Amino acid sequence: MQSRVEPFVVGPIVGTAGQTSIRILGVMPAGTLKAGQKAPHGRIRWRLEGETRWRGPRHFRINGNFDSSGVVVLKDLEPGRRYQFQAGAVAAADSEDKALDWGHVNTGHFRTAPASPRAPVSFLFGSCCYRFVGLDHEVEDGRADRIFSRMADNAAASPTDFVLYGGDQVYADSTWRVAAASSQREYFDLYRQSFGQPNIRRLMANYNHHMILDDHEIENNWPARANPDLWTSKYPAAMKAYQIYQASHSPAVPLNAEGTRLERDPDALWYRFRWGCADFFLMDLRTERVLSRWPWQRKIMSRAQEDAVVAWLEDEPDRVKCLVSSVPLFPEQRWPFRGQDSWEGFAAQRQRLVDAIHDSGCRRLLMLSGDVHASLYARLDRRGRNPIHGWICSGLFWPTALMAFRWYRPMIRDHHTLRGLWKPSLGRVTVPGEVYSRDAFSRVSVDENGATLALFDRDGNPVPDIGTEIRW
């Protein structure tokens, strides 16, 4: 008797790939396994694109402690190759491999990292996808899912190595405090509904994904209004949901010694990876913040993470470096729009980071940022130092009804001196092009000679006045 391989309700989400390995997340229906229950219900088979014979199937564990989800790690793959795969779950964990019916699951794709350390890189980048959540805690707006269809079309039309998200992949507080997620089940359901929409599911199943959080995965401007109750209830619920749905398929979660499965909870949420000619560092600028009335004591990230960023900058500084910051390093906002939530509210640490970038000798550095619901290119120049290039792409979807954030250009200082806490100048900031304040995603293509930054609107059409060509 055949055992039917059922589709996951969320996923498969293709995550981090090395030259010979890949992580893939799958989620079964809520309540399939209760807390404490773990069983190998997951199944996956894979093959090189163009092959006819499937490899596997591989069994992997679904964990009731993690919202009936599981991550499978495939090893011994070939570098720089595109693979096909099918993944799903069986009702009986001991189902025989020869009796599996794969006819009800779709075929996905993933790509392994290239062997050459000089290979060019091309990826899609965006941030901030607002989905309206009603009083019943249901996602009630399907418009947000439309842009992921356009991203999938763009990815299929040009060679695409992966998709990178810069924060606010979900909005736990889309109606501010009204109906905001607070319990563990509400955060789980938010991800299940947001990542379960059809177009984002198709994109996540066919291209490698990298993600980092910002405030709305918890609540707006976290931890500005945090109190002991929120730290011990809301925050742990938000972080567990984030760990399952965004961090688990990234390098943030360590593997066992054999590299075959997830080993334990992450020590930190920031992480780094390498792809061809470029090194990437995704900073966690939310969960390690220290707020203080004294400017020199405020921290946007821990000293351990800051040291890790500096070490990353100094490791082979002649390579392309892509530093992902969920909030912009620059440009600053004009008064009265200036606040304490972005880097400008952490002047001492911003000064140390800019100095570390310049002192490292990196001459091919690109800052990738989100948060501000606008897209633009900015540049920081300092005499005698290499420029720092900044690319902001936000948001993937922001409803027209919330028009207050639609015109960003008047809010920013487009030509200004970036000041440190005790230094009068860290360099001169310029915004040479236009600012786009509508829904958009971008394609970032880098090689050892330069970078191309291209913006696309929600219909997938190019927005030529926003992007730019960079020569290192």
Image (tube, rainbow, N blue to C red):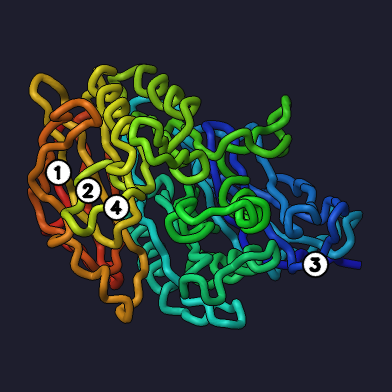
Labelled pair 2, 4 in contact (Cβ < 8 Å)? no
Q: Give the residue at mark 1.
A: 469
Q: Disc 3 versus disc 4: distance between alpha carbons?
A: 42 Å
Q: Position of residue 338 (x, y in %)?
A: 24, 53
Closer to us: 155 or 394: 394
* Residue 31 numbered tag: 3
**Extreme residue toward the front, this view:** 293
Q: Secondary structure at mark 1?
A: strand
Give the residue at x 49% y 48%.
208
Amino acid type at image mark 1:
Glu
Mark nearest the camera among 3 and 4 is 4
Residue 367 in view in this figure? yes
Amino acid type at image mark 2:
Leu
Q: Give the residue at mark 4.
A: 339
Labelled pair 3, 4 in contact (Cβ < 8 Å)? no
Q: Is residue 442 left or right of residue 235?
A: left
Labelled pair 1, 3 in contact (Cβ < 8 Å)? no
Closer to us: 437 or 221: 221
Q: Which numbered disc flags the more N-terminal residue, 3 or 2? A: 3
Q: Which numbered disc flags the more N-terminal residue, 2 or 1? A: 2
Amino acid type at image mark 3:
Gly
Q: Which numbered disc flags the more N-terminal residue, 2 or 4? A: 4
Question: Which image quadrant: the N terminus?
Answer: bottom right
Q: Is residue 299 above or below residue 340?
A: above
Q: Position of residue 132 (x, y in %)?
A: 47, 77
Give the residue at x 89% y 61%.
92
Q: Which numbered disc flags the more N-terminal residue, 3 or 4? A: 3
* Residue count near mark 3 (Cα–Cα under 10 Å), binned few <14, some 14–19, many ≥20: few
